[in-house]
Image (spheres, rainbow, N blue to C red):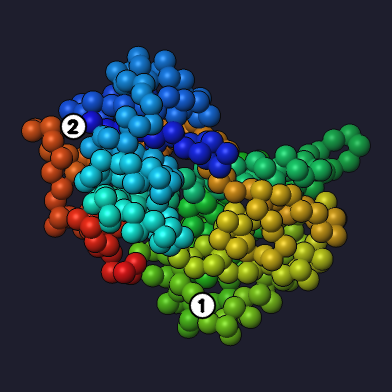
Amino acid sequence: MQISILCENKEIEQRVAATPDSVKLLERLGAKINIEKGAGDLSGYADELYVSAGAKIVERSVCLQSDICLCVRMPSQKDLNEMKKNTILIGILNPYENKSYFDDLNKNNITSCCMELIPRISRAQSMDVLSSQANLAGYKAVIDAAANFGKAFPMMMTAAGRINPAKVMILGVGVAGLQAIATAKRLGAVVSATDVRSATKEQVESLGGKFIMVEDEESKESETSGGYAKEMSEEYKKKQAVLIAETVAKQDIIICTALIPGRTAPVLISEEMVNSMARGSIIVDLAVESGGNRPLSRVDEIVEHNGVKIIGYSNVPGRVAKDASSLYAKNIVNFLMLMIDKEEKKINIDWEDEIINSVVLTHNGQVKLEKFI
């Protein structure tokens, strides 16, 4: 059994799907590991480290002939057509945006596994790539905001007078939002947060933040069975917008994290709200790649509007690539343990497993997940 790790397009992705530590774990499953030359360079993992861990450095053409291919993003259509038939491809494959790849996956009988579709159940927590990557994104968003903010975060008492703490508001209290709250609090800011899910109130307050939300009957049904936010009614959005507008005007920094899987990100910050903020304020839009939580955001740009800086970095976890790769690689190892027989050291997919059935997009020349058919 051969497992290969592909090198990503380095212009858009700094992460890698395996680290030297995860290579050792994969070898214990009975696999021989091939690493494409330079795959870990941008994550701080040199080829020599992989060799020391027992892997072999090879060209891409060799990697594409393995039994299992690991990646971060969907490989090119050319790569898919050069893969060995019946290859198992595992990565963050973004099926919502990559439907044009389905024919190539099916034509080559590739069993594709979308790691971002891991269900949010207790047994799958160690495989949850969305959570592991969002955690780092929330942290980095606050650090990026602090780097661009012209003032200090904590309150400071000096002989010349007092410096008031920064006021930070988090929009969206998922994994990224919770980490943003914790990071901003550690830096000494006064933190508030909002989410359509009333269940997040206790989490916000446990981290020392103030929870802001329109609480009505609709808000009680605002979460899917999978733990994600639902699309709210236009009436609710209007009420929430009024409340947010009143709060935004008083903030120094806004961190936007609101996402709905497979949908355009909801617009939470209007141009009028931005205009109400003081000059020198910062907005970080973690949803910029899905359309952004405000229309002024631009992918991979810092836009200045009326003196307010709007940061729209893409692939924020990739900005802390070493840690992001380490967590992602561990997620993949834990997932592979479901697919490999530890005793016989061979691939053995349990098609009755809930996790397997949630993530396998294509198999035997067919799209398996009904929502993508």
Q: Is residue 301 above or below residue 100?
A: above
Number of the front mark, 1 or 2: 2
Secondary structure under tag 2 reads loop
Task: Quadrant for residue 156, please give it.
Answer: top right
Q: Secondary structure at mark 1?
A: loop
Q: Which mark is residue 1?
A: 2
Amino acid type shown at disc 2: Met
> What is the crowding at mark 2: few (fewer than 14 residues within 10 Å), some, or many (at least 20)?
some
Residue 210 x %, y %: 61, 60
**How far from the left and from the top, in percent, is residue 289?**
58, 56
Mark 1 crowd level (few <14, some 14–19, many ≥20, 10 Å Cα): some
Residue placed furthest toward the left:
344
Residue 255's place in the image compared with 62, above or below, is: below
Q: Write the residue at 14% across / 57% down.
A: 352
> Picture coordinates of residue 349 (x, y %)?
15, 48
Left or right: residue 323 compared with residue 337: right
Q: Is residue 222 visible?
A: yes
**Can residue 123 be seen here?**
no
Write down the residue under mark 1.
Answer: 232
Quadrant for the N terminus in the image: top left
**Type of amino acid under label 1:** Met
Q: Residue at x 79, y 47 (%)?
A: 164
